[in-house]
Image (cartoon, helix red, strand yellow):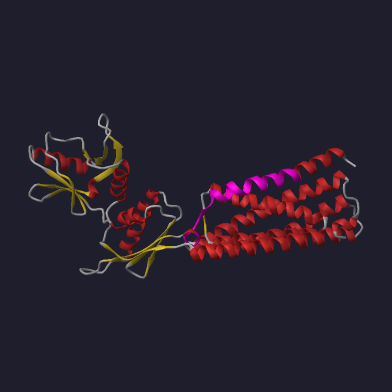
Amino acid sequence: MNVGKTVQLTALVLLVAIVAAVGFTPIGQAIKLGLDLQGGLHVVLQADEEDRKVSPDEMKKVQAIMEHRINGLGVEEPLIQIQGTNRLIIELAGVQDPDKAIDLIGKTAMLSFRTADGKVIVEGRDLKEAKESLEAGSNQPVVHLSLNPDGAKKFAEATRANLGKQIGIYLDEEQLQNPTVQDVITTGEARITGYNSLEDARQIALLLNSGALPVKMEMVEKRTVGPTLGVDSLEKSKVAGIIGIALVFAFMFLYYRVPGCVAIISLVLYSVIVLGILALLKATLTLPGIAGFLLSIGMAVDANIIIYERLKEELRDGKSLRTAIESGFTRAFAAIIDANVTTLIAVGVLYYLGSGPIRGFAITLGLGILSSMFTAITFTRWMLRLTASSGIVKSRKLFGA
């Protein structure tokens, strides 16, 4: 018996067990749950078509602006999609402050600088950048505005013509500030004060940076989605997953014996890899995503079964254990690649043509397939080689032959 190989094999099994026991909890905490599993906010906006019909290009621009605004809120994986010709559906999972999110979503964000007689001198399209900060000295939150060259020129002319007079700053017809012009401003810089907190200033800066909506949007539906159904479904998915995995492990152990044990270790490592990648990507897990993960486990088992059946055939032909392992993997390689590549093509189509939960299903399934190919072709092979070299198992029956 090769003592060194035996020690390596034992250490490896213990390492995988430790990784599984210690790693799953923090990984699970790092993965965010989708709207169907933890609840959130569901909003439906409809374009105001009283004066004219909204165009598809305008709706796409509304969608892009909303994505920019909501991403600035820090919401992970929001669902923002056009419904019909004039509606936009927005779903935000795990929103801590629904009122704040609704306020941000509902604003048209039309910025304008106006003279005392109501004449507009600078508009939102003249804005280059808006940035929130704490004012030096007073430590008060402010929003600094930088105008583009055309806007800076117009602002300079307006301040020159209105020295000693007031120029109001408006957002969606609401006056934010009405300062008196003390000097001619030629730098194209302005600021808005009067905020209660830096967060309020950041929200205004976010609105201004995302731009004004091309059409007025009215909120026709607003509701907070509870996670009751999702939690119930999640618990059932957990039970189904545990039962299914336990049956798969039992089958692999009873039917393939030693290779089955190796497959179980590989599947544990595979699960840690997939969930770890999802946590690193800060992915949002939905019920379809869980389905994709469980399906990929089945495909990972399928790859191991193909390999082990080839291995048994080689052992029945009278080959030695080491030769049978190498030959079995070589013969199974093409079948595994073909099966996984065709599935990856389907995953690519689902991701490209789908949206929301469909993409979540495609991502988890795709990650699972790639990870299963790694564990089945490299890790499982190395484990079987290590087992054969250690001399722990000498009976061919323990390899399923």
Residue beneath the point at 60% across and 55% down: 367
**Disc count in the image?**
0
Image location of residue 135, percent across then percent down: 27, 33
Above or below, 221 against 67 in this view is below
Tell me, yes or no, whether the highlighted magenta stretch contains residue 24: yes
Above or below, 299 against 384 in this view is below
Q: Quadrant of the N terminus?
A: top right
Residue 335: quarter of image: bottom right
Tell me, yes or no, whether the highlighted magenta stretch contains residue 191: no
User: Toward the viewer: 353 or 387?
Assistant: 387
Image location of residue 376, percent across then percent down: 72, 54
User: Toward the viewer: 337 or 370?
Assistant: 370
Predominant SS of the magenta segment: helix
Which residue sits furthest top?
137
Image location of residue 218, percent across then percent down: 28, 64
Residue beneath the point at 72% across and 49% down: 378
Residue beneath the point at 32% across and 59% down: 62
Residue beneath the point at 68% across and 63% down: 243
Residue 365: quarter of image: bottom right
Which segment is the magenta one?
Answer: 13-37
Residue 369: in sight, yes or no? yes
Q: Quadrant of the C terminus?
A: bottom right
Residue 298: in sight, yes or no? no
Relative horizontal placement of residue 50, taking residue 12 as reference (left or right): left
Image location of residue 371, percent across then percent down: 65, 53
